[in-house]
Image (spheres, coloured by chain):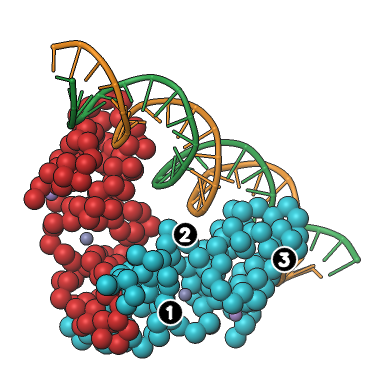
Chain colours: A red, B cyan, C orange, D green
Amino acid sequence: MSCSTTLKNKGYRLTPQRRLILDIIHEADVHLTAEAILGQLEDRISGVNKSTVYRTLELLEGLGLVVKSDICGGRVYHHAEEGHHHHLVCKSCGRQFHCDEAVLEPLKESLREKLGFEADLNHHIIRGLCAACQS
Amino acid sequence: MSCSTTLKNKGYRLTPQRRLILDIIHEADVHLTAEAILGQLEDRISGVNKSTVYRTLELLEGLGLVVKSDICGGRVYHHAEEGHHHHLVCKSCGRQFHCDEAVLEPLKESLREKLGFEADLNHHIIRGLCAACQS
DNA sequence: TATCTTATTGCAACAGGATGCAATTGCAAT
DNA sequence: ATTGCAATTGCATCCTGTTGCAATAAGATA
Ligand SMILES: [Mn+2]
Ligand SMILES: [Mn+2]
Ligand SMILES: [Zn+2]
Ligand SMILES: [Zn+2]
């Protein structure tokens, strides 16, 4: 089901601002900052306010349509349907390595078994030292 | 080695502000917000500025003496020497469960073996559903 | 299509946190 | 104990994100 259909089904109104923010999120192939989304939005309509962007992103996140994450100080957003993955961030060189979601499956299973906790491990950010920076 | 000795050895100056912030962090048995630290600081000396608090905490974090974490929206700080642990936060009831550092050891080992990445997994925040909220 | 309700927006003010700069002060050398 | 210099502080200002409120407009109803 498309994001806009989900919005409608849940009783939320389809405003031009919301349609465009959804378009921008869908077209992006990378994670976007709120500022970047506002920038692209201003290219298409005038008079948009940043609070609308933040409120819309918060709504979409609550519905599970977009994912928000704190990465290297800034907050970025991406379409939830894009492939699940995690980020390994090297604290020495700053490079980022994508990491398949399967890597965290054993941890999820272990938390479920030992503590009865159903962890929500989508898009985790893990800091550390990459192979090249360990010497 | 004490935190103030570490500061001195690295060539940083021991100002009254830094001494007191270290005292506050050491006395605390819970994680403190920057605002709370500033509050306690104002009880002991006057005219302290919040930027001093933020800069000091950033310095101490960089030296590995305190740990900063984003937990439920706000940022909290604690003395690094306190027992390593993680937090399981239930996104339904909001309750927090502490979780031993051993739980993440297998993941750390797996990242090291498979990707050569030396993960820094101290004080992770994991969201999900607690046992009680899964029914 | 015109009307009505109320969800959503824009705006202004606010809060937490970061930063450039001049004044202060720790502390090492005299 | 004085002096001198660089590290640190306080202050002002900026930046990102949040919030209360009045104006606007989506979309249901007639
Ligand atoms: Mn979609
Ligand atoms: Mn200590
Ligand atoms: Zn990602
Ligand atoms: Zn903790």
Amino acid of disc 2: Gly
Closer to the chain start, of discs 3 and 1, is 3
On the same chain, marks 3 and 1? The answer is: yes
Q: CA distance from mark 3 to mark 1?
A: 34 Å
Q: Which residue is label 1 attached to?
A: B98
Disc 2 packing (10 Å; few <14; some 14–19; many ≥20):
few
Residue corresponding to mark 2: B74
| Marks 1, 2: nearer the viewer | 1
Q: Quadrant of ligand 2?
A: bottom right
**Amino acid type of disc 1?**
His
| CB at disc 1 and ligand 4 closer than 8 Å | yes
Chain bearing mark 3: B
Q: In this figure, which residue is indicated by the disc labeled 3? A: B16
The chain holding disc 2 is: B
Image quarter of residue C9: top left
* Residue depicted at 72% across the width and 66% down the height: B16
The image quadrant of residue B99 is bottom left
SS category of the residue bearing label 3: helix
Ligand 4 lies under 8 Å from the Cβ of mark 2: no
